[in-house]
Image: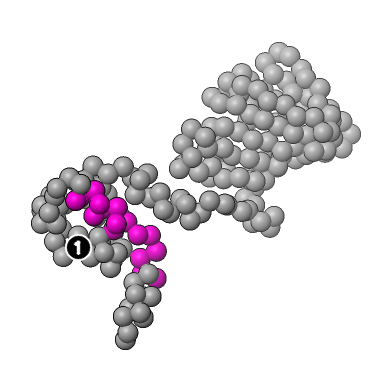
Amino acid sequence: MTDLQNNDLDAKRVPYHFGEKIRTVRERKGYTLKVVAQKAGVSESLVSQIERNRVSPAIDTLLTLADVLDINLEFLFEEYHKKRPVEIIHKNERRLITEDDITYEELAKPNKSDGEHSIESYLITIPIKSQTHRGSYGHLGREIGHILQGNCKLLYENTEYDLQEGDSISFSANTPHTLINAGDIPVKALWIVTPPQRFIH
């Protein structure tokens, strides 16, 4: 087998290259391979192979090396996140949940790597004479809604706000809130919540 074929196989076996980062940090700290291996409780050969991206480390080994070298995990996985900058949910792949007769279709999944900027988004369908219940207790964060079809009311604590097709609204979610279908056709609304409440698990 040629060196080129070997390199191709290595690339397939190790999809995310942590090695360069581990080696760079180790060298900056002035640690030898032997010292890092002893602190991590693994062989010097294994550390060398990881640094050269010859093997993909088990997660516990990777976490141990990160701890020994005091490496931030976000820094280690930065390459992984950059390779997935766009996430698509196709129409026939949406996860959904029903609450009584209300339907929530997931449009955007929460992403832990986004931290405080993480969101979740749903297409909500509210039948005639029905209303949502999830926000009736309030929660931390903000919500943004856009009415795609129908007429509804937002009951925000003790105040009602009329919303027509095409209207949008945003508010602090820590106050109890309920979306009520006030028309004669089902309401469809695009809804965004931050931080995510992880309604669909």
Residue 8 screen position, x and y as percent: 38, 75
- Which corner quadrant of the image does residue 12 belong to? bottom left
Of residues 38 and 18, the one drawn nearer to the viewer in this rendering: 18
Tell me which residue sits at (59%, 39%) in the image: 120
| Residue 169 locus on image (x, y percent) | 72, 26
Image coordinates of residue 137 in percent, x first then y, are 60, 23
Colour scheme of the rendered structure: one colour
Chief SS of the magenta region: helix
Residue toward you, 31 or 136: 31
For residue 175, above or below residue 199 = above
184 is within the stretch colored magenta: no
Left/right placement of residue 31 relative to residue 58 reads: left
Q: Nearer the viewer, residue 151 or 42?
A: 42
* Quarter holding residue 153: top right
**Does 26 appear above or below 130?**
below
- Classify the position of the N terminus by image quarter: bottom left
Q: Secondary structure at mark 1?
A: helix
Range shown magenta:
12-27
Q: Does the rendering let one see residue 16?
A: yes
Say whether residue 163 is left or right of residue 94: right
- Residue 37 point in image, percent of width and height: 14, 55
Label 1 crowd bin: few (<14), some (14–19), many (20+), radius 10 Å: some
In the rendered structure, which amino acid carries the disc numbered 1?
A: Ser
Above or below, 28 against 11 in this view is: above
Residue at 64% in and 35% down: 192
User: In the image, what residue occupies the spot 57% across and 45% down?
Assistant: 109
Left or right, residue 125 beside residue 72: right
Residue to which mark 1 is pinned: 48
Residue occupying image coordinates x 81% and y 26%: 163
